[in-house]
Amino acid sequence: MFLGIDLGTSGVKAVLLSDTDAIIGQASAPLTVSRPQPLWSEQHPDDWWQAVCASIESLRQQHDLSGVQAIGLSGQMHGATVLDHDLRPLRPAILWNDGRSQTECLELDKLVPELRAITGNQAMPGFTAPKLRWLQKHEPEIFSRIHKVLLPKDYIRLQLTGCCISDLSDSAGTLWLDVAKRQWSETMLASCGLTLEHMPELKEGSQITGYLKTDIAQQWGMDPVPVAAGGGDNAAGAIGTGVTEPGQGILSLGTSGVIFVVSDDYRSNPANGVHSFCHALPDRWHLMSVMLSAAGCLDWLAQLTGAADVPTLLAEAEQSQPQESLYFLPYLNGERTPHNNPTASGVFFGMTGTTTRAQLTLAVLEGVAMGLNDGLEALHATGITINEMTLIGGGARSPLWRQILANILNMPLSYRRGGEVGPALGAARLARLSLYDDKPSDITEACPVPALLERIEPNPEKACLAQLRQEKFRRLYLALKDEFPST
């Protein structure tokens, strides 16, 4: 058996994977987010560890863990976890969705003109580097005591093994990594008042980073097994879906929307807000476009219109015809790819006195799909080839939305079994790979693609109409761009 532990923002999930890649057990424990000031988002690292222990204890109630052969980790990316010389947290971790460091992003751009060339990314408040510049400026006493900076899942590794080590996929989201060279950039570290001494050692996601401490092994009813490097949540989620080879992609319709595509070489398009990261496997990179509001737009609409729930909205939409004049700009929380505009807002355009709730729902489904298509074009601008796109996430359960997406993206989409376990499954697979990580030919076998449930082909006539509507969708954003608040 192999154990995968995923440290999410809202909770920890632990998954047991059999030697034949079957999920034989899973458990979770909740987490809460602290927002002590506007734009702030924090969690205390000790709460993460307690949630990990709670999830493992829950798993132990169901399964004998003595057969676990290795552990893998995944987790929320970008979080700044600062530790003192005793490797204890100096303050709560600043999370990926914390927006306080916009000014520091502008400072980094001026201080390091080659930032985008080194990191393959724009400086955004979500990344780790601007958070450390903020600490240096606003909490200098704490900053002066920093001995190590870890990412969230790597704090869990520290508790498991006593080692300060990270993987390349997670570290690529710090803005301190030279993504092409897969190593820390001393230039980027210096821009934040840091050195290589502050950083964890780097490993590929399928490499062993240490061994479970004896006391924890005894507590969990396990041997002191190897702990694999693992990956950031998106990279680990991709491995859990079998997306390991160049040209494979995922379209994730969660609260936010992500398109993730694997490459066998380094590519970037930072000008359009594309994320260029290392994959959690050797000699693999990945590109990501990110929408900040995707399926979350449906939750918002259900609440706004008094619908019982999202399935009610979708059922109504399936029985309705779209209103041709109606458009929806899905920027309820700003937007990342391709606009990188944190102040962009959601907009309904073209409503009339006859507009129905079902038509609003159809407009939302279409608007999110068009936003994703803008992100897809930003990915295509890197020259990457996409051979297959797999739909995952809660929004992908809607057959109506799947067809709308195929029409607007104008490409076949695959809808596969599973996907809800996501990063924890990928972490468990990386644990298994760590036992034979010198055999790259085994990667595809160790990370199979889930069973295909449906292949959705675009409707040629509707795809042609969607292209015309996409052009107006883009014009609407450009017309309103200057009306959104300035940063």
Image (tube, grey):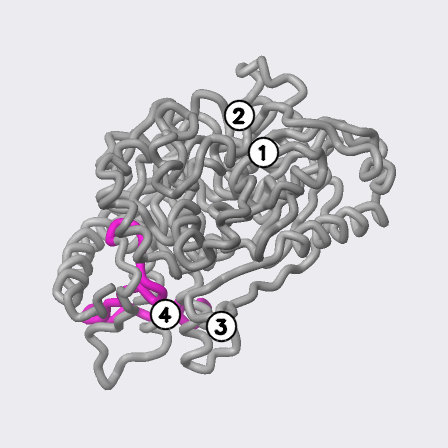
Q: Quadrant of the C terminus?
A: bottom left
Q: Which residue is mark 4?
A: 361
Residue 41's x, y, as percent? 49, 62
Residue 357 sits above or below residue 127 on the image? below
Report the amino acid beneath label 3: Thr
* Mark 1 / mark 2, whichever is N-terminal: 2
Q: Which residue is located at x 56 percent, y 66 percent?
A: 34
Report the amino acid beneath label 2: Glu
> Looking at the image, can residue 451 be seen?
no
Q: Which residue is mark 1?
A: 230
Q: Which residue is located at x 23 percent, y 70 percent?
A: 485
- The CA span between labels 4 and 2 is 43 Å
Q: Which mark is residue 312?
A: 3
318 part of magenta stretch: yes
Report the amino acid beneath label 1: Gly
- The CA span between labels 1 and 3 is 39 Å
Q: Which mark is residue 204?
A: 2
> Looking at the image, can residue 229 be seen?
yes
Segment colored magenta: 314-339
Tag 1–tag 2 contact (CB < 8 Å):
no
Task: Classify mark 3: helix, strand or loop.
Answer: helix
In terms of depth relative to the viewer, which is nearer, 324 or 28? 28
* Mark 3 / mark 4, whichever is N-terminal: 3
- The CA span between labels 3 and 4 is 10 Å
Residue 221's x, y, as percent? 86, 38
Task: Classify mark 4: helix, strand or loop.
Answer: helix
Residue 422's x, y, as percent? 57, 44
- The CA span between labels 4 and 1 is 38 Å
Report the amino acid beneath label 4: Thr
Snapshot quadrant of residue 350: bottom left
